[in-house]
Image: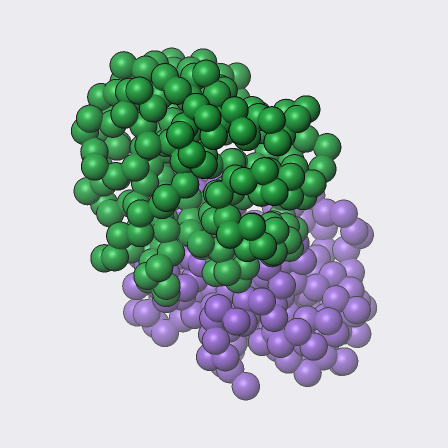
Chain colours: A purple, B green
Amino acid sequence: MKKIGRLCVITDTNIQTKYSHIEIAEMAIKGGADIVQFRDKSMPASEMVNTAIEIKKICNETGALLIINDRVDIAMLSDADGVHLGKEDIPVNEARKLLGKYKIIGATANSPEDAKNAVKAGADYIGFGHIFQTYSKKKATPPVGISGLQEIVNNIKIPVLAIGGIDLSNLDEVINTGVHGIAVIGCVVKSSNPEKTVKELRSYLI
Amino acid sequence: MESNKPEFKLLLITDRKKCKDLIQVIDTACRSGIKAVQLREKDIPAVELLSLSKELRKITKKHSAMLLINDRLDICLLSKADGVHSPEKGFLPQQIKRNNKKLIAGISVHSVKSAVDAEKNGYDYIIAGPVFRTASKIKYGKPLGLSVLKNICDSVNIQVYAVGRINPERAKKCIAKGAYGVAVISAIMKSKNIKKTVSEFKKALGGL
């Protein structure tokens, strides 16, 4: 099985505009994140490739993984470690044709059924959520809660990253489910000291 | 880098919102002799874009027409399309051709300078516009007009396709200024008689 990090920071320049993708990646890596997920839905393609290449260099300082959200082509051209695919993105089995067996493909799941389908399609990890209420995305479904997460952790054999509203106040109960790791956005990029917040999150995930 | 000269004169750019049934329109257009289609649907999720692209690939292949994909190399590769069309800051030709050097790389330009840059960067063709005033491209400011189109055509050796409210009559004027062909959306997407429209373009362009 591929080595999947346990603390994923997603770069977001929608819910905040103070930091760029590269700045968030720098703070995440300094704080000890072992996955950076680069997500931008509106950046021009050539700029995305260049930004991804810059983030990859930052990740290489510690051996952290760079995962690109949605865009398989950007992942190929920047030689990222993989992609994260939402349910409306390119299907996992199709992305695999382009990326080959060694690259990492993560898939979003919001239900046990999604999770099983993602495993069947060949995903390397699942991003499962949203666990709690979140302000980074408008959600179509209610939060899955700790019990929903527990069910997935008990039944899914590939690594699960819990996502959605996770911060220092609720991290304990998330980790107590035995989940492989977490993905965070808001609690880091909206923190008054993002690097420190990542360090604190990291201290729970040794 | 290998250059892949496109041979079509009329490029049909899709806009599903301008017609009732996109598949039907593309099918009729291809049956009527169109040799190139660019899939450009910016607001649908990738999973839907991929299945639409595969659908269009079947139709275009049957009629030996080219299929180009706007801005997404992954969708192009997975649906075995013929190339990628980049918006102004889209993928570079060497990126588009990295995995398959036979792919065609095109780009949209709105000035003489970006046309010259596009050729320098190795694109196979450019779409220049809007030549005439168009509601959908208002954000690009004033239309280029036929004189700037002529300057663009005089400044590059790669094929120039004029875009922006092109009808058969205006297509003729663009060709007279040095354009190799034209790219159209509404003229065909909204046409009540696609076969007739295509044949009018064929006449104006001296081929398809």
Foreground of the two, A73 or B86: B86
Q: Is residue B15 visible?
A: yes
Q: Position of residue B61 (x, y in %)?
A: 55, 55
In the picture, measured across the screen, residue A164 lies left or right of residue A194, that is right
Report which quarter residue B79 is drawn in.
bottom right
From what the image shows, is residue B192 above or below residue B14? above
Q: Residue at image x 21%, y 33%?
A: B156
Q: Position of residue B150 (x, y in %)?
A: 26, 20
In the picture, measured across the screen, residue A99 lies left or right of residue A174, that is left
Q: Residue at image x 78%, y 60%?
A: A144
From what the image shows, is residue A31 above or below residue A41? below
Q: Is residue B164 visible?
A: no
Number of numbered callouts drawn: 0
Q: Residue at image x 36%, y 74%?
A: A63
Q: Position of residue A134 (x, y in %)?
A: 67, 49
Image quadrant containing the N terminus of chain A: bottom right
From what the image shows, is residue A74 above or below residue B120? below
Report which quarter residue A52 is drawn in.
bottom left
Foreground of the two, B148 or A41: B148
Report which quarter residue A105 is drawn in.
bottom right
From what the image shows, is residue B36 above or below residue A93? above
Q: Residue at image x 74%, y 74%?
A: A116
Q: Position of residue B105 (x, y in %)?
A: 35, 48
In the picture, measured across the screen, residue B107 lies left or right of residue A13, that is left
